[in-house]
Image: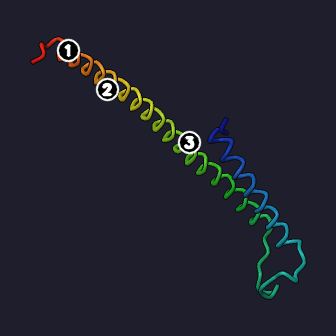
Amino acid sequence: MHNSPSRTALLYALLFGLLAGFWVTFTHMGPPVFMVIDAHNVHHDAPADAAFAALTTVLLFFLMRYHFARQAEAHEALRRCHEDLEQRVQQRTQALNDEREKLLGILDAMPDG
């Protein structure tokens, strides 16, 4: 059974949120040896970075939920079309078999010669 679009989006958003939170924590409290540019040129604002990561996570959740919901709707529509096509093929096959039997009956009823 597949996860619901909301659950899948939540899992991806939480994963992103954890990674973003780790990154914010690491860049503000981690060893400065990993800094690419001089520490004097970097403006550290941990609350703003954390708020940005949280807002991005929430936005990502809603966008992904929308995308996964549309994808699930498209999948369901495709499944319904496939079922409809299968039913129409069976009906057409039955109609052709009926016509074939009818024609064979006519041919059998005709006198030879």
Tell me which residue sits at (23%, 18%) in the image. Answer: 104
Q: Residue drawn at (79%, 67%), measured in percent from left and top? A: 23
**Residue at the disc numbered 1:** 108
Q: Are marks 3 and 1 in contact (CB under 8 Å)?
A: no
Q: Which residue: 80% across, 61% down?
A: 21
> In the image shown, does 7 or 33 lie closer to the viewer?
7
CA–CA distance in space, label 3 to label 1: 58 Å
On residue 69, which mark appears? Answer: 3
Nearest to the eye among marks 3 and 2: give it.
2
How many neighbours does mark 1 have within 10 angstroms: few (below 14), some (14-19), or many (20 or more)?
few
| Badge 1 element | helix
Give the position of the N terminus as an image quadrant.
Answer: top right
Label pair 3/2, CB-CB below 8 angstroms: no
Q: Residue 10 in the image: x percent, y percent? A: 70, 46
For this view, does 52 lie left or right of residue 87? right
Q: How many marks?
A: 3
Label 2: state its secondary structure: helix
Vertical placement of 98 versus 18: above or below?
A: above
- Marks 3, 1: nearer the viewer: 1
Q: Which mark is residue 49?
A: none
Disc 1 marks which amino acid? Answer: Asp
In this figure, which residue is indicated by the disc labeled 2? 92
Please say if the residues under marks 2 and 1 sit with CB atoms less than 8 Å apart.
Answer: no
User: In x, y percent, where is residue 42?
Assistant: 77, 81
The type of residue carrying mark 2 is Arg
